[in-house]
Amino acid sequence: CPALWGGMPGSPSMATEYIFHKGVLFPIMNYSPETLSFVENEFQVRDDHVFNVTYPKSGTNWMLEILSLIRYGGDPSWVCSVLNWKRAPWMESQTGLEAALKYLPPRLLTSYLPIQLFPKSWHHSKEKVKIIYTLRCPKDLLVSLYHFSHFMHVYKLSSSIDVFLEDFLSGNMPYGSWFNHVTGWMRLKGNENFFSITYEELQQDSVWRICHFLGKELSEEQVATVVENASFQSMKGNKMSSFSLLQDKYIDHKKGNFLRKGICGDWKNHLSEVQSQRFDIIYRERMQNLDITFLWD
Ligand code: A3P
């Protein structure tokens, strides 16, 4: 029982504000075992669904913005008038599921779920449903997540980056272990309807490839509009995308920003040599069976 862990020797430092569902931690706020079970067992995936799947802090909202803009051929009206969490609801959260069920097809949905908790009905639509999986250098992701935990109430605050690092490496994190998430989803690499891309590649602008995967033909001009409107600065200046309108019960706006730095390699400013080496050891061990080389490797 996670609620009992606080104060127990050897307990995960972040356990008290989370629930355990099928071996995976989820924030208590906005998640429930009932919703998670519904999503896994009863949610009906349709052929025209497009899923934006990530582990948190991998570039979820950047991809969400790109997909929203591609949907309307680069026209920014939708991203400037509808909140991002309504444009592509996080289907496994309680409020996200409500929005997802009301969403008129074709649905664009976001998910942090590890593959084993993804809707089972997807298996019947595998030939058609498109899944876009975005990954990010895990050290940068960890640093981004650490900052995020300081202003988002869904995450429990860690006493130090050292403690946070250990929790990350051992998988005591909401949405489970990053290693399991990535190795689970990346098993689909090579499937026609699975497209994976890294945050680092997005920096180099890969909108063409995403359009091609979605079967959307955009002109050069339209692609340029997508890139421009999904830039860090544009998103920061757009209240529909910056999370500045997120309710205070979820976020302490005075303590931080969703759009923090938006750069690659920031981990070097936050992790010591020792911490980085410790990370590398576990990384090599956990990723050895995945026959993929990433930019950060
Ligand atoms: P940093 O905290 O390193 O700045 P997610 O959307 O998965 O929660 O990821 C958030 C991270 O993506 C944050 O990283 C945020 O700044 C970055 N990000 C969001 N939109 C971006 C954009 N358009 N360009 C670059 N980085 C972006």
Image (cartoon, rainbow, N blue to C red):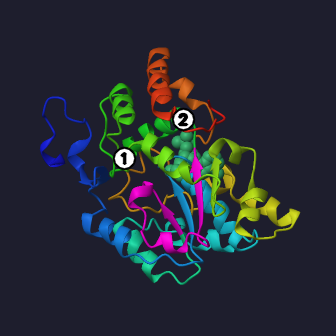
Q: Residue at x 65, y 54 (%)?
A: 190
* Amino acid carrying mark 2 in the image: Asp
For label 2, the SS is: helix
In the image, which residues are magenta? 109-135
Q: Residues within 10 Å of mark 2 (few under 14, many from 20)?
A: many
Residue at the farthest top position: 274
Label 2 CB sits under 8 Å from any ligand 1 atom: yes
Left or right relative to 104: residue 80? right
Asked if residue 295 lies left or right of residue 23, the reply is: right
Query: Which residue position holds label 2?
Result: 140
- Quarter of the image that includes the C terminus: top right
Counting from the top left corner in percent of width and height, residue 64 is at 59, 61
Classify residue 253 as left or right of residue 33. right
Q: Residue at x 51, y 63 (%)?
A: 110
Q: Which residue is mark 1?
A: 176
Sequence-wise, which precedes: disc 1 or disc 2? 2
Instruction: Identify which residue, 115 or 146, lies in the foreground.
Output: 115
How far apart are the alpha carbons under marks 1 and 2? 17 Å
Residue name at image x 70 percent, y 44 percent: 201
Which quarter of the picture shows residue 99?
bottom left
